[in-house]
Structure formats: structure tokens, C-alpha cells
Image: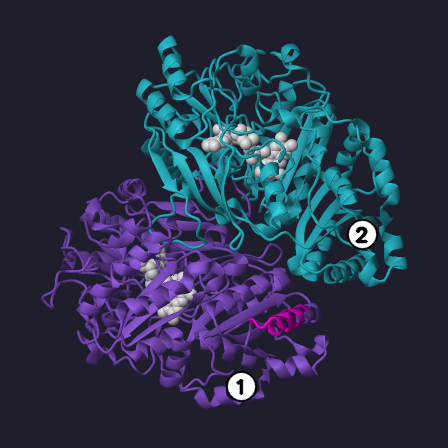
Chain colours: A purple, B cyan
Amino acid sequence: MRVVSRALMPVCACAPVMVGLFQRTLRLRTALRHLSPHSTFSSATTAGRPPVDLCGPFLPAPSRQSGVCCRKLHSGADGSEPSPAAAPDRRPFSRISREDLDSFRKIVPGRVVTDPDLLESSNVDWLKSVRGSSEVLLRPQTTEEVSQILKYCNGRNLALNPQGGNTGLVGGSVPVYDEIVLSTALMNNILTFDSISGILTCQAGCVLENLSGYLEERDYIMPLDLGAKGSCHIGGNVATNAGGLRLLRYGSLHGTVLGLEAVLADGRVLDCLATLRKDNTGYDLKQLFIGSEGTLGVITAVSILCPRKPKSVNVVFLGCETFDQLLKTFQLCRGMLGEILSAYEFLDSECMRLLNTHLKLPNPISDCSFYVVIETSGSDPTHDGEKLHNFLEEAMNSSLVTDGTVATEESKIKALWSMRERVTEALTHDGFTYKYDVSLPVERIYQLVTDMRQHLGGRAKSVVGYGHVGDGNLHLNITSPAKDPALLAAIEPFVYEWTAGCRGSISAEHGLGLKKRNYIYYSKPRQAVALMGDIKAMLDPKGILNPYKTLPDDLK
Amino acid sequence: MRVVSRALMPVCACAPVMVGLFQRTLRLRTALRHLSPHSTFSSATTAGRPPVDLCGPFLPAPSRQSGVCCRKLHSGADGSEPSPAAAPDRRPFSRISREDLDSFRKIVPGRVVTDPDLLESSNVDWLKSVRGSSEVLLRPQTTEEVSQILKYCNGRNLALNPQGGNTGLVGGSVPVYDEIVLSTALMNNILTFDSISGILTCQAGCVLENLSGYLEERDYIMPLDLGAKGSCHIGGNVATNAGGLRLLRYGSLHGTVLGLEAVLADGRVLDCLATLRKDNTGYDLKQLFIGSEGTLGVITAVSILCPRKPKSVNVVFLGCETFDQLLKTFQLCRGMLGEILSAYEFLDSECMRLLNTHLKLPNPISDCSFYVVIETSGSDPTHDGEKLHNFLEEAMNSSLVTDGTVATEESKIKALWSMRERVTEALTHDGFTYKYDVSLPVERIYQLVTDMRQHLGGRAKSVVGYGHVGDGNLHLNITSPAKDPALLAAIEPFVYEWTAGCRGSISAEHGLGLKKRNYIYYSKPRQAVALMGDIKAMLDPKGILNPYKTLPDDLK
Ligand SMILES: Cc1cc2nc3c(=O)[nH]c(=O)nc-3n(C[C@H](O)[C@H](O)[C@H](O)COP(=O)(O)OP(=O)(O)OC[C@H]3O[C@@H](n4cnc5c(N)ncnc54)[C@H](O)[C@@H]3O)c2cc1C
Ligand SMILES: Cc1cc2nc3c(=O)[nH]c(=O)nc-3n(C[C@H](O)[C@H](O)[C@H](O)COP(=O)(O)OP(=O)(O)OC[C@H]3O[C@@H](n4cnc5c(N)ncnc54)[C@H](O)[C@@H]3O)c2cc1C
């Protein structure tokens, strides 16, 4: 069974629990008034947050859903012009034969899945927006098996789609046509962990949350964390260069991944699995694979530098009346919280409305236009509490913040975090969602949301903004009751042009996958894209690895 | 005039100053005994350290030095077998003609240097160990000029050596034969600085120390710092993926460099100069150039994420009796100093002897086998002082540390730092130096030094170890009165085999350049090196960019 299935189980509605939690959570003003600096902000021992209900009750069971809620990206089926997100024609790869299946059964005996019911969840992406029609799922356990599979596929000109937890949001993780799915789900061994250096080496299929659990027992944490942690694989994280909630503090995977092993299209194993913080012997090849979305090689193992588990974690949930105040609060807390600041996330009042309506999560503070989740992680609970207290006092006194609440226990910390983490889920209940994940100069982040609202007038159901303010990363989401080509035409290319207009990135962390590949020129010059094409041609001359993804159609 | 010259001026001997400083510096035991936690460790406002005298009185003036102290890497001139560091035969590049010079004068009018005296410092490396015989130095000011130069050179099959501050330590920064030197010294403009995000964009020729100064005035710092800061260029830092003294805290340039602009061998300008923290639109091409040592393109501009200037900086100089104690002290301080730890550097008693003997720097504490420099940087002087106090008390009580001193003012902080930073300089006074810069599992770092001492017996003058413990990075240096091929034969390949034996890196931060290119296989498998060759061939098919460097001879 795929590891992802665990997170696909519906979780019970937690609204009553939340209400209780927040009733017991100290309100900011009270906290500031009644408690001494040293006791105001007690701290929990972990920064853990609850796994998100990745696929709540909204989503129909596989058998009922076919073709219903999948965006027909592959054709202009509704009569409109095919959008740049639509798949190009199938390339002339071979089709799988009985002999191929026999060969695969020799390479991965008992792990060649052809049952359509079992294949279903590998053919459809997390958003249920893209559906492939693969007839084979391979589940290797070792690098050697991956190597043999690729060698075989390359020889036979068979296309292949590497798949981790299948939580990707840009249609990169599922086949477009009949590409073979190569799942890393059974490559889930931890290989080594060095408790002096904090360097972890593991197979690519380890689930992020499992790695976090393993490390926390050893007084370390993973340098990345994201809402999909219960399902996503570390290999998928590296393949997408996932950002997430800790990037502000621990930086990107380009810095924290110390080594990786990848199998190239022709089956060659590239061993860059160093476990050293520093190594300047030649070009840093592993960097090529970080963020290459399965188009340059299959990542089979990763080594990563893990930070010590903070002794003290605090979470604050604040409300601001304007986005300008929210930014000023960010500047203030960068200065006053300094090295203990570990997250600065935001959601707008529209997100709060969706959380209330669809997930029955009540607003833990009074109604505001914007909400901020601030997390601190440090080594001294007293010092951290003092810093936080001073910051909050200053933020209140200077009227940057209207209301707020401080979580003082692990369960409450999780509850506050879920206000930010469950927005994605709430959106899936609101209707058909158009998702945008852009990087912008931090001071312009929210202007895109307001401009979009104005631009769309009454055409959308909801236009919401949330994301990683600290990284300049906005998630703009637009819902409508059903798929709506006219709405889409109003959103795109407007959103891309707007982003390009301030030299932003049209994909901050989700990658390009199938859906955004043709928009790459909004963020990258032609010279650069051409060079990407050269790299692809060098490493995968037949183009069998994750075809139709990441690179634009005009390259071939 | 080259910017580097500033740092090449001899600085006055600072021994008397140091003695005075240390007399006024609080001794650790006293500090612990007499001062309250809150006042014990006052803090300075910057982490600045003095520029190192890069080239003290030991080094003869250009006119006297020719051929004298340059290691004849290019030939087996002394009758011995040419070492793997020796240059291969000159490749069949064109030779510079009068017409070429005329063309260059059109591209960079008034900035084509052919005077042999002026060329001297560009032909010889900082260690005076490699000498080229270039007859032309070009000093472009703009990316467009660099592009035109490369286009011309590529068309004419003229080889070219990009050069920054020429402080590289592996013979990569100077020509081997008659390659044209392209200096970035006049490309020294800061382009933009965003005081909200802390993102700096500048031309590649900006001197690191100048950037630091610029940023400190704006309450930010550079994420990297190294002894050569007064001369090295940010472009050279990125081209070598320099590590340095802040890597422990702020991570490598693969994480902090957000964008770069490079000119490819054929003159194409690759614009990856994003100023965004997150951008997952296609492959991260800039990563290829970080650490490529001028062999894949000329870096013309860089954008980099800069941390806030810490409000509080403390430096402690400690002595340990055994390396095991030094490692235990590291573990202790990682736990107790946590997020404020910004450096953990070490030197051994042999380094101290050289500092005493050659630079007249007195030991600020009593004689020990090992010395540690610990730096903290944080946002709250009181909190930092308390953390440091508690750590030191624990380290003393558990007898991990024998003696120590705490610097309480900026000038004293600088003085303590110079004990670590000036070791490189002290070595140049001790004799001919064989330099090794290796990454090892942290617990094995010093074993290489003791094994080497034992292995060499009395053959070397000094065998010293120092470096960045926090990063697992040892600088092993071996001196002898003069160049000594027999000694070299005893050191190599012993040192490389030893390092490879524990899966270390034979070049942690200095790169491979000319000297170490053929040793790459000790740290990288053949598959990986072959792929590096493919990348080189793709980006620079004629091989005109920094030939004979980084990649091993057997690739061609
Ligand atoms: C609720 C939710 C929250 C999310 N939050 C964030 C967030 O905060 N930040 C963020 O950056 N992303 C976020 N994401 C999207 C993110 O891309 C994925 O969650 C994750 O990084 C993908 O991992 P995966 O194992 O599921 O990969 P998949 O979805 O299976 O695959 C993603 C891509 O990587 C490739 N791939 C997967 N494994 C390998 C491998 N071993 N070798 C080569 N290629 C491979 C696939 O071919 C595909 O192109 C979120 C997604 C969800 C559903
Ligand atoms: C006293 C001293 C202390 C040092 N300390 C450290 C340390 O702590 N950590 C560390 O990592 N290193 C250290 N170094 C070595 C380090 O490599 C350099 O100091 C620095 O990074 C090189 O910068 P530079 O501008 O001097 O480059 P150069 O020496 O001029 O060049 C180095 C290499 O980069 C290439 N190059 C330079 N500029 C460009 C460009 N614009 N585009 C493309 N290629 C280019 C050159 O061709 C060459 O291969 C030290 C050196 C000295 C002398």
C-alpha cells in the first residue's frame, strides 16, 4: 500500500476541540497585562504541527470521481482554445508490451502493479486536477532496481514518471498519458544519522513526517516542514525544492541538502551522496537535481543537514488592520526576535472566512483584515519569552497589532498553526480552485490580491491571499463554483504579467510541472531556458524522464 | 591600480598592541569569579575583524622574486617526476597578435594592460607558488564589455583566465601559460540594496570588505567573512564557493546567493540575477557557476541575501588539553549557545608557536594543546551574556576547558580573532608551505594531523592544524625550509588517501584550481567527474575558459 494513503484518511472535524483550545489559550492583552515576562510565554518542546487532512470529505472516493473533478488539462475539450497548461500531443514513446511487463517483473518481483484500481491514486494528482492513464506502477526498493528499470526504459524508449508522495500541486507528479509510474514509496530506509554533525542520510521515499519523528527522538529536527508532511517524500521535496514553513530560518534545500544519489535516464547511478558540510571538489552536480521535478534523474537517496531541536518554541497569532501594519510588524519582529524568529506566515480575512465556513475553525481572536502566525524557536525558554514579550508590548503600544493570542502548550501551538496550514484544505471545499504561488518583493505581496479582486469584479467566488511573508511568497487562490474558462481567461495571463512586472517569480516553491511549464518565460529569459533545454538533452537525450513537464513545449 | 594592492601593503607589526590588548582583556576565570551574569560579557556592536596582512615583509618585491619562490608547478624542472599538480602541455590556443590587442583596445579603451611590470601581480598567485606568463590584462567595467571580450576570444580561440582579488590558494586565479587575464577589479559597483529584504545586488568585482562596510552602515552584514576580505572579490568568492568564518551560522553560498549574471564562453549573457528568496521556475542554473572556478563562465554580478547586523557580538578564546575535550566543548556550546553561536574555530599549539615566533603575537592565555575561538552573535546583549556565562561555567566546571579569555570590546574582539585569522600569514614566514584543506567527519579532524606528524617523522619543519571545526574543515599545513620534493612525495598521496579513507573531501573550501585538479577522484566518483566534463563541453566547447583548472587532465 502506498504510504500516502495514511494521510488520505478523513480526519474528524476538530472544530469543537479548537473552540476549547482557544478558550483556554491566553489572549494577548491579558497575557501582557497579568503575567511577568518570565512566565508569560511558556514554551513547548517541539514545533510539531498536526498532519493536514490532505483530502477531506469533499473529495469523492476514487470510483465516483473519474472525470468529474479533474481539470481536463489534456485537451481543449470544452471547445475553448487549449490553454498553455494543456498537455501537448503524446510524444512517440513506445507503448508497454507484455514483454516489458515480464522484464519489469524480473527486476522488481511482486512489485509491478497493473490493477487499475490500485493504479488510480497514482494517476490522479492531489488536487484532482490532472489525470493520467498509466497502466503500470513500479515499486523498487533499491537504487540498483531503479537503475535497471531506467536502463530498460531508455533502451526501449519507454517514458517514466517518478513519483513520491504525489502531493505536488502543479501536475508534475502524475503521468500525462501512459508513462510508467516509478514510485519511491518502498524506498523508505534511513541509512545513517550522525548525532554529532546532525547529518541524516536516507532513501528518497522516506515520508517527511517520519523523518521528523525519527530526528526529534534524537534531539534534532528536519530543516523543512510543510503541510503535506504526512504524505510527501524527502525525494519529492528535493525534486521540487520545496520551501515550506522553516525556510525563513534554515534556508533552502540548496543549502541544507549535502548530498544526493540519482539515477540518470540511461540507468547510470550518480553518487553525490556526500555527508560533508563542505566539499569544493569540482562542480556541485547535486544542485542540478534539486528542483528539477523528476526531469533529469530519479533521486534515490539524500543526505541533509539537520538543525538541533529547539528547547523552546512559542507561537503567536496576531491580527492587523492593514497589510502595511503587517509588514511593519514583520520588520519589528525581525529586529526584536532576531535569531529566534522561525516563521512569519500570514492569511487574510477571506481565508479566515473559509476556515470558519468549511472547516468550522473559529477565529481565535477578534475579526481583523489580516492574521499573522509568528513562531520562535530558541535554546532558552526564559530568554525567548522575554524577547517575545518585549516585541508584543512594542507591537501593541505602537498600534501595529489589533489583537492576538499566544499559545503556551504544544496542543495549542498545533491548533494555532492549523489556522495557517489548513487554508489549502479549506479552499478545496470552496469550489474549483485556481492556485498561484508567486514570489514578489515583500512590500508588494498583497497588492496582487487586491488588484486581482478588482480586476475580476464579481466573477470569482473567493479571492484569497496567504503565505510565507518572510520569504516574499504569496499563495493567491481564486475559487469558482465550477471550472470556468472565462474566469481563467480573466486570471491568466493577468497574474503572470503582474508578477513579471515586478520581476517576481511565477512559481516560488511549487515548481512548474505540467501546468505552468509554458509560463516559464515570465520569470526566466530565453537564454536561460535554452540552456535548461541543453542540460535536459545532455542528461536525458531521449526525453523519457517525466516528459511534458517543467520545460516549455517550444524547446523541442 | 588593482584593488588588491591595498591589502598588499605591509602593516606594522602589531605585537605590542596585542600585548596591551590582552593585558586589558578579562581573563576567563576572573570574569567568571567577579562579574554578574549580566555584566560579565559586554558586547561590541560589530563582528568586524582586522584585514589580514596578506603578504607581509616575508615576500620579496616583484622585481626580486621572479622564479625564486614560485613553485615550478609547470614542469618537472628539478629532475623529479612531474607531480599531478604540474601543468599539462599548453593546449593549441591561438597566440595573441597585434590585431587582437587592437580589437581589445576598441572594446575596453585605455584598459588593456601590457606593461610586464603591471602584469606581474596578475601572473603570480597569492602564495607565490604559481607563475603564468600572460602578456595581456583586460579590465572591463561592464557586463557588455565582458561579453564582447569573450565573444572575440571564443571566435579567435584565445584562452582566458578570469581573476578577482587573486587570493585563491590552489593556483586557479593566475594563468598557466599565456592566457589573457580578465580582471573584475573595475566592476565594483553596488547595483541595489533592499533594506527590507536585506538583498544586495552588486557587480562581481566588489571587494568583500567594502561590501561589509557598506552593509554595516545599513544595519546588515555579509553572510560570509574570510581572512582575505580586504582583497577578494565577491565574484571570486562565488566562483570558489568560499566558506570562511560565518558558514556555521549562515550556511554556504549555494543557499545565500539568490541570483547571478554570468557571461558564457561564447559571449552569451546569462541573466539569473533574481532578487527573490524563492524561485522554482525551471532548473537553478546559477548553482552551476557557484564553485566552478571560472571554468564555465565569467560571473559579472551577484545578488545575495544578507543577515541583519547582530546587536551583540562576543568572542571567547579558550584552551583545551585534548582534541576530545575540544569536541566535547563544541557539543556543549552548540547545546547551550544554540542559535547565537556564530563561529567555532580552532588552532593547535604549533600554530600558536608560529604566531609567537613569526608575528610576535603573544598567547593571550596559558599554554594549551588546543585553542578555540568561539563567537556569538545575537539580538540581545543581556541574553547573550547570560548564555555565554552559563556555557563557560559549565565548560570550566566539567574541566573541558583549561583556560580562557573573553573579549569585551570591539578592538579586543579583533585582536582575539587575529589569533585565528593570521595563522595563514604566520605560515608563509615559516618556510615553503604545503597546504591542505580537507573536510572530514568532525571527530576525526585532528587524527589526520597526528598521523601526518608520525608519518613524516622529522622530515617537516612544522606540521600544523587549524580550521573550522564547526564545519568539519581542517587546514593541515606542512612547512619545510625550502621546496622539498622528497617531503612532498611523503605527504602525497598519503594525505589524499587518508582523507578518502573516511569519505572526506580533499578540498573543503579552496577548490581544485591548477594544483588539485588531478586529485578529484579521491573525492568524486568517475561517473560524476565525467558528467562535469560533459557540462564543461556543453558550456565551453573550445575550452577557452580557465584551461588546465578544476577538471582532471584525463578528461580531454
Ligand atoms: C497540503 C499541502 C501543502 C503543501 N505545502 C507546501 C509548502 O509549504 N511548500 C512547498 O514548497 N510545497 C508545498 N506543497 C507542494 C510540494 O511540492 C509537495 O508537498 C512536496 O514537496 C512534493 O513531495 P512529494 O513526495 O509528494 O512529490 P510528488 O508530488 O510525488 O512529486 C513532485 C514532483 O517531484 C518529482 N519527484 C518526486 N519524487 C522524485 C524522486 N525521487 N526523484 C525525482 N523526481 C521526483 C515528481 O516527478 C514530480 O515532478 C504542499 C502540498 C500540499 C498538498
Ligand atoms: C589569507 C587568506 C584567507 C583565506 N581564507 C579563506 C576562507 O576562510 N575560506 C575560503 O573558502 N577561502 C579562503 N581563502 C581562499 C579563497 O578562495 C579566496 O580568498 C577567495 O574566495 C577568492 O576570491 P578572489 O576574488 O581572490 O578570487 P581569485 O583568487 O582571483 O580567483 C579564484 C578562482 O575564481 C575564479 N574567478 C575569480 N573571479 C571570477 C569571476 N568573476 N567569474 C568567474 N570566475 C572567477 C578564478 O578564475 C579562480 O579560479 C583565503 C585566502 C587567503 C589568501
Q: Which residue is mark 2?
A: B401
Residue A527, horizontal then vertical, whole percent = 30, 40
Q: Main secondary structure of the magenta part?
A: helix
Chain letter, disc 2 residue: B
Between residue A345 and residue A515, name the one nearer to us.
A345
Mark 1 chain: A
Residue at left offset 59%, top offset 47%: B247
Residue position marked by numbered label 1 in the rendering:
A22
- Tell me residue A544's x, y (percent): 23, 50
Q: Regarding ligand 2, which quadrant of the image does it lie in? A: top right
Observer able to see residue B127: yes
Mark 2 residue CB less than 8 A from any atom of ligand 2: no
Q: Where is A194 relative to B458, above or below?
A: below
Q: Which residue is drawn at the image coordinates 86% and 49% (left, top)?
A: B27
Label 2: few (<14), some or many (≥20) within 10 Å?
A: many
In the rendered image, which quarter is residue B556 located in?
Answer: top left
Look at label 1 and name its amino acid: Phe
Q: Secondary structure at mark 2?
A: loop
How far separated are the C-alphas under marks 1 and 2? 48 Å
Quadrant position of the N terminus of chain B in the picture: top right
Task: Based on the picture, tell me whether residue B491 belongs to the magenta stretch.
Answer: no
Residue B398 image position (x, y, % from top left): 81, 59
Q: Relative to B418, is A195 on the left or the right?
A: left
Other-residue count near label 1 (Cα within 10 Å), few / some / many at <14 / 14–19 / ≥20: many
Magenta segment: A387-400
Tell which residue pokes out farthest to the left in this image. A79
Instruction: Report the side of A526 relative to B412 (left or right).
Output: left
User: Horizontal placement of B54 versus B392: left or right?
Assistant: left
Q: Is residue A82 above or below residue B260?
A: below
Which is in the foreground here, disc 1 or disc 2?
1
The one nearer the camera, A477 or B503, is: A477
